[in-house]
Amino acid sequence: MGPAGCAFLLSLLLGSCPSSSSKKKDLQSVCGRPVYSGRVMGGQDAAVGHWPWQVSLHIGESHICGGSLIHKRWILTAAHCIKMSWFPLLHTVWLGTIKIGYSNNGVKHHVSKIIIHPMFQDSTADIALLKLLSRVTFTPFILPICLPSITKQLTIPDSCWVTGWGNKNGGDNNYHSTLQEVEVPIINRQACERLYNPISSIMPESEPVIGEDMICAGDTYKMKDSCKGDSGGPMSCHIDGVWILIGLVSWGAECGKSLPGVYTSVIYYEKWINATISRAEVWGPTIWTYLTSCSLLYSSLWLPWDPPVPWANILPGE
């Protein structure tokens, strides 16, 4: 095919694809608007369809973390959930279910690409994007959550909701079989810093524990918090009639006993999220991704896998 033919084919392909602006408008019309609503205050089992963006991230048959559907091909989760697993196709996500495994409404998708924030280290930049192998079909049980807009001033409410399957007592791999939900109060970052780093009030020059890319939330008096097993899952806030993804479960100290949970701020990384997705959508899957995945298949299958270290589990109010 000559240059003219290639140019025609390229224009045909580009012309047949919706523009990024039209895709964004389509997403905004459905995101953060669950078909089913109505919930009871306090930690409890979630009802089917109340949190249609919630996903369960698996390696093999094992649930390892939560995540949020933000696009027909993209999941947002915590970087620490996947930092030890470099072969994307070993990961699967379950959508449309409140059960940790198979259910009538549940749909399983394979992960084709993993993008960890380049600045991720320990609890800093604890955020990652997962690209799905195939597009998600939206249903009343599977819908994306809205991302905050960097062009619009956003006022975070006094409390938001956290969801996940993490275990009740902070142990390892003893997850709830049904999705849990709890409303948690948002805690000022300076107040949270004083809780985690008491010397900061007398030594303001000391390095902060709570970074600008973090949000604190939780009720230590009523034991409302997240803990082991919920990492990467959403902190969903109801703002101006829609649900917006404000935070990702990241880390904490004692699962609601004395200190609040710490979440990665989605607002802080919203620009990176949009730029990363835009680049990947324009260029599509690159061959080096698959070559790299294949070259690491041996180590992924034969080297021992360590579970995610930072915690997360929904603790109901007493």
Image: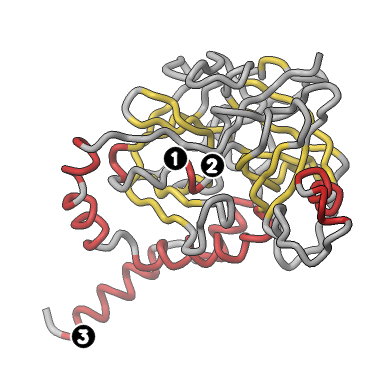
Looking at this rendering, what residue extends furthest in the left direction?
Answer: 1
Give the alpha-carbon distance from disc 2 to disc 1, as whole Å: 9 Å
Reading the image, the residue beneath label 1 is 136
Reading the image, the residue beneath label 3 is 4
Q: Position of residue 189 (x, y in %)?
A: 81, 52
Residue appearing at x 82%, y 48% in the figure: 198
Residue appearing at x 76%, y 45% in the figure: 196
The residue lying toward the viewer, choosing from 238 and 80, is 80
The answer to whether the residue labelled 3 contacts the one labelled 2, judged by CB atoms less than 8 Å apart, is no
Q: Can residue 181 be seen in the rendering of this structure?
A: yes
The quadrant holding residue 185 is: top right
Q: What residue type is labelled 1?
A: Val
**Badge 3 element:** helix
**Which circle's residue, 3 or 2, is located before the other in the chain?**
3
Label at residue 310:
none
Vertical side of 131 occupied by 168: above or below: above
**Which circle's residue, 2 or 1, is located before the other in the chain?**
2
Q: Where is residue 98 in the image (x, y as percent from the top left)?
A: 56, 20
Residue appearing at x 43%, y 48% in the figure: 130
Label at residue 69:
2
Left/right placement of residue 274 relative to residue 5 reads right
Give the alpha-carbon distance from disc 3 to disc 2, as whole Å: 40 Å
The residue lying toward the viewer, choosing from 142 and 272, is 272
Q: What residue type is labelled 3?
A: Ala
**Badge 2 element:** strand
Quarter placement of the C terminus? top right
**Which circle's residue, 3 or 1, is located before the other in the chain?**
3
Q: Where is residue 220 in the image (x, y as percent from the top left)?
A: 81, 28
Quarter placement of the N terminus? bottom left
Which of labels 3 and 2 is toward the front? 2
